[in-house]
Image: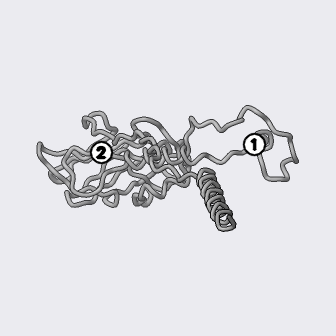
C-alpha cells in the first residue's frame, strides 16, 4: 500500500506540473508572425511636359534642357511642400526619339540676380527644412496658458498654442514624395524630368533674374528662367 501511495503522489505531482506548465505557456503566447505590411506611400515621379510648358529651354548638344523655377516651393505631383533654406527647379531633358542621356543633379547650377552660380544639392539635404503647409498638429485649436512674455524668446503664437513634434508618418511621406519627384540619376531614356535643389535662404520677392546652367555629358546650356 505504501508503494501505491507513493506512485499516486508522483502521478499527481506530474499532472499538476503539466497543468501549470500549460498555464504558463498560455500566459505568454508566441508572437504573431504574420504582421500586416505598412501601407505603400503613393509617390509618382514627375512626368516630362512639352517644352513650351516650361519657363525656358535651350539646346545642349543633341538634347534640350528646360526648366521652371518654383522658389521655396517644392512641387511634387501629389503635394506642394515648402523650405526656407532651398529653392527648387523642375528640370526636363528631351531629345530625338530613342535618345538617351546620363542624368545627374551635379550637372546643374543656378545663378540668381547675376551673382555667383550655386551648385545643385542632393535632395537628402532638403529634408531637415522641409515643411508641409497643409499639416495641422493635433490640439492646434486649444490654447495653453500663457507663461511669460517676450523675454522667453517666443512669439505670441508660440506662447498661446502648444508645440507638437511632427509625427514620423508625416515626415516620411514628405521625404518619399520628394525623393520620387527628384531628378533621376544615371543613363535614362528621354524625355526625363525631376526636381533639383539649390541652397538659398533669400526672399523670393528679392529675386529679379534666374539662370539655370547645365554643364554635362551632352554639352552646355544656359536657360533663362522667369520667377
Residue in the picture at 50% in, 45% down: 72
Residue in the picture at 54% in, 43% down: 170
Residue in the picture at 53% in, 52% down: 31
Say above or below: 78 vs 164.
above
- Secondary structure of the residue carrying tag 2 is strand
Q: Is residue 176 left or right of residue 159?
A: left
| Location of residue 157 by image quarter | top right
Residue 57 placement (x, y as % from top left)? 27, 43
Q: Nearer the viewer, residue 49 or 127?
A: 127
Q: Is residue 225 left or right of residue 48?
A: right
Residue 172 placement (x, y as % from top left)? 50, 48
Q: Which residue is mark 2?
A: 193
Q: CA distance from mark 2 to mark 1?
A: 41 Å
Q: Nearer the viewer, residue 26 or 188?
A: 26
Residue 109 placement (x, y as % from top left)? 37, 57
Say above or below: 22 vs 71.
below
Q: Are marks 2 and 1 in contact (CB under 8 Å)?
A: no
The answer to which of marks 2 and 1 sits earlier in the sequence is: 1
Q: Please identify the quadrant where the N terminus is shown.
A: bottom right
Nearest to viewer (mark 2 / mark 1): 1
Neighbourhood count class around disc 2 (C-alpha, 10 Å): few under 14, some 14–19, many 20 upward = many
Q: Please identify the quadrant where the C terminus is shown.
A: top left
Neighbourhood count class around disc 1 (C-alpha, 10 Å): few under 14, some 14–19, many 20 upward = some
- Secondary structure of the residue carrying tag 1 is loop
Mark sitting on residue 52: none
Q: Which residue is mark 1?
A: 162
Residue in the picture at 86% in, 40% down: 145
Residue lying at the far top of the rendered structure: 141
Residue lying at the far right of the rendered structure: 148
In the rendered view, how is the structure colored? one colour
Q: Nearer the viewer, residue 47 or 33?
A: 33
| Location of residue 42 by image quarter | top left
Amino acid at each position: 500500500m505504501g508503494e501505491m501511495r507513493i506512485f499516486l503522489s508522483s502521478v499527481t505531482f506530474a499532472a499538476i506540473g503539466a497543468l501549470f506548465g500549460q498555464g504558463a505557456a498560455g500566459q505568454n503566447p508566441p508572437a504573431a508572425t504574420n504582421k500586416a505590411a505598412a501601407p505603400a506611400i503613393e509617390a509618382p515621379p514627375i512626368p516630362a511636359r512639352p517644352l513650351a510648358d516650361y519657363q525656358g529651354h535651350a539646346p545642349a548638344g543633341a538634347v534640350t534642357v528646360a526648366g521652371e523655377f518654383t522658389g521655396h516651393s517644392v512641387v511634387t505631383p501629389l503635394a506642394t511642400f515648402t523650405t526656407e533654406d532651398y529653392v527648387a527647379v523642375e528640370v526636363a531633358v528631351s531629345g530625338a526619339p530613342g535618345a538617351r542621356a546620363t542624368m545627374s543633379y551635379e550637372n546643374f547650377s543656378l545663378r540668381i540676380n547675376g551673382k555667383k552660380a550655386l551648385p545643385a544639392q542632393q535632395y537628402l539635404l532638403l529634408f531637415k527644412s522641409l515643411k508641409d503647409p497643409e499639416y495641422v498638429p493635433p490640439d492646434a485649436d486649444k490654447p495653453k496658458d500663457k507663461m511669460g512674455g517676450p523675454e522667453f524668446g517666443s512669439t505670441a503664437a508660440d506662447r498661446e498654442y502648444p508645440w507638437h513634434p511632427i509625427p514620423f508618418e508625416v515626415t516620411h511621406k514628405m521625404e518619399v514624395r520628394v525623393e520620387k519627384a527628384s531628378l533621376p540619376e544615371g543613363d535614362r531614356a528621354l524625355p526625363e524630368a525631376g526636381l533639383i535643389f539649390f541652397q538659398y535662404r533669400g526672399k523670393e520677392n528679392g529675386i529679379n533674374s534666374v539662370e539655370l546652367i547645365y554643364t554635362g555629358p551632352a554639352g552646355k546650356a544656359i536657360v533663362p528662367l522667369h520667377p
